[in-house]
Amino acid sequence: MSGQGWWRAPRRRLGIGAAAAALALAVAGLALTTANGPPAAQAAEPRPPNVIVIVADDLGRYDLSIAGNPLVKTPNIDAIGQGGVRFVTGYAADAVCAPSRAGLLTGRYPQRYGFEYLPYLAGFHQVRDGTYGQDRHPSVALPVTPPPPEKNGLPVTEATLAELLKARGYRTAAVGKWHLGYSKPLTPTDRGFDEFVGVLGGSSLYARQDDPSIAASRLPWSTIDNYLWDTRTASIQREGKNGPLNGYMTDVLADEAVGFIERAKDQPFFLYLAFTAPHNPLQAPKAIYDRLGHIKDERTRVYYAMIQSMDEAVGRVLAALDKAGIADNTIVVFTSDNGGASYHEIPQENLPYRGWKTTYFEDGLNVPFLMRWPAKLPAGQTVPGVVSALDIVPTMAAAAGAPLPTDREYDGRNLLPVLTGQAPNDLDERTLVWRKEDYKAIRHGRWKLQTSRYPEKVWLHDLATDPTERHNLAEAMPDKVRELQALLAEQEKGFAPPGWTPTGRSRIDIDGHSPHEAEDVEHVYWAN
């Protein structure tokens, strides 16, 4: 179904009598116009829906109470799915933050336009050279060629959802984490957003390190965590300038989101609310931490206090919609950029799947995916099949009546016909691919193939019978492996060379953490 005008009433074929009546009305209208000028009143075009896309950072699929996690209460996030749609299988566009967000905001595989790795960040190579300690995840440093600043992020040739909706008359704002370019012409206000308040890069402190109202937990075994504690400050960008963060990051972002809703409520708006939580460094409001006394492990307690804080922030956003009287005609999507991070060492955050962020096992890709639109979508739907963050652009564009550019291929699909019952649910019959250097994955229907060069290995899983990827069928089914490899190779023909080089490859153990020398433990090396 075309994205143009989806929300309008469907056309009906007129019978002879109805056609004659319509012709008479048209003639009468023409006479009125000729004699008296334009008609005094015309039917107003229905207002397209507001759109809010909420993205958590490194949130595991099991990290919400709607998923059954007994350690945390997330009633506000849960309410999005309960009041609308909860998708059984939602995939991120990549297993690490920046390429995943690029795919989400463009509806296209990030590899189509060279966004294969995190944007280059001067100094990040020190995470790999021992400056910040010896990581439990050994890494291999790679020679780096820094790209020009104006090309170090989402290419200007790509159309963002903000640009598409802005052309349709929407007011647009990005609040929170960007990570798609640090300088012009790649910043949010260059890419279709009227307003931006947040963090241009990949992370920030949530509060000052000496703030007595904050509970914190450091991860001494993680070089990335040590790097963030040593190099990040509690700051936020407004109107193109960095300034001190006055308050707790998640609360400040909620303040900004609520303020935008109040200012923009009288016209269609798009709000991209990208929380930094629960990405490390682990810092949480002590008032929430104190309420989670049932969690005995300190690190786990801080982590889930961060998630509960984010849930309360989401509640404030939903309440602002109710207060403004616009909740019914506002689409709210909640998802995560990838699965939980292995360096947290919180085993339950991705249950029951295998893998972590920065792997293409289900734990790295399978994320919460909730959507609410009270005016159009019946509440309480649980939708089987496969959806992707790539679907957000074509779905929201269709809802807004914003046509997609016709000069490029879109990898996401408009979900509205399925969700409204206008089309049968065929979401199980999808093909999705992911790639990071020589580590690749494809899901085709019920089958999923992963291939790695570091180490040389192939994994084949039947997700219909083995959703947690415990039984590798690659040796037993070589024909299926070849079939999926051919499909993957065909998809890769449309990919561009990476726009910049990674700083290194890090080892990620699929089932947890092991000594560096344990080569018999299943693992992959991930280039970033």
Image (cartoon, helix red, strand yellow):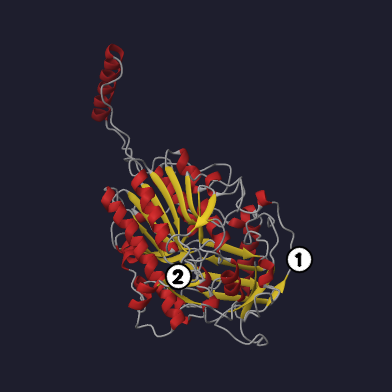
**Can you see residue 362?**
no
Q: Name the spot of residue 392 as percent of width and height, x first.
A: 46, 54
Q: Nearer the viewer, residue 65 or 435?
A: 65
Q: Name the spot of residue 403 as percent of width and height, x first.
A: 47, 41
Label 1: few (<14), some (14–19) or many (≥20) C-alpha neighbours in 10 Å: few
Q: Nearer the viewer, residue 421 or 522?
A: 522
Most extreme residue toward the top is 35
Q: The residue tagged with tag 1: helix, strand or loop? A: loop
Inspect the image, locate mark 2, and give the three-letter code of the amino acid beneath it: Asp
Tell me which label, 1 or 2, sits earlier in the chain: 1
Q: Say above or below: 192 vs 516.
A: above
The CA span between labels 1 and 2 is: 39 Å
Q: The residue tagged with tag 2: helix, strand or loop? A: loop
Marks 1, 2: nearer the viewer: 2
Quadrant of the snapshot with the C terminus = bottom right
Inspect the image, locate mark 1, and give the three-letter code of the amino acid beneath it: Pro
Judge from the rendering whether residue 447 lies leftward or rightward of residue 248; answer left or right: right
Judge from the rendering whether residue 484 lies leftward or rightward of residue 246; answer left or right: right
Label 2: few (<14), some (14–19) or many (≥20) C-alpha neighbours in 10 Å: few
Q: Say above or below: 284 vs 192.
A: below
Residue at image coords 36%, 61%: 314
| Residue picked out by circle 1 | 143
Q: Name the spot of residue 234 as percent of width and height, x first.
A: 51, 63
| Residue picked out by circle 2 | 211
Residue 481, disc: none
Judge from the rendering whether residue 184 lies leftward or rightward of residue 237; answer left or right: right
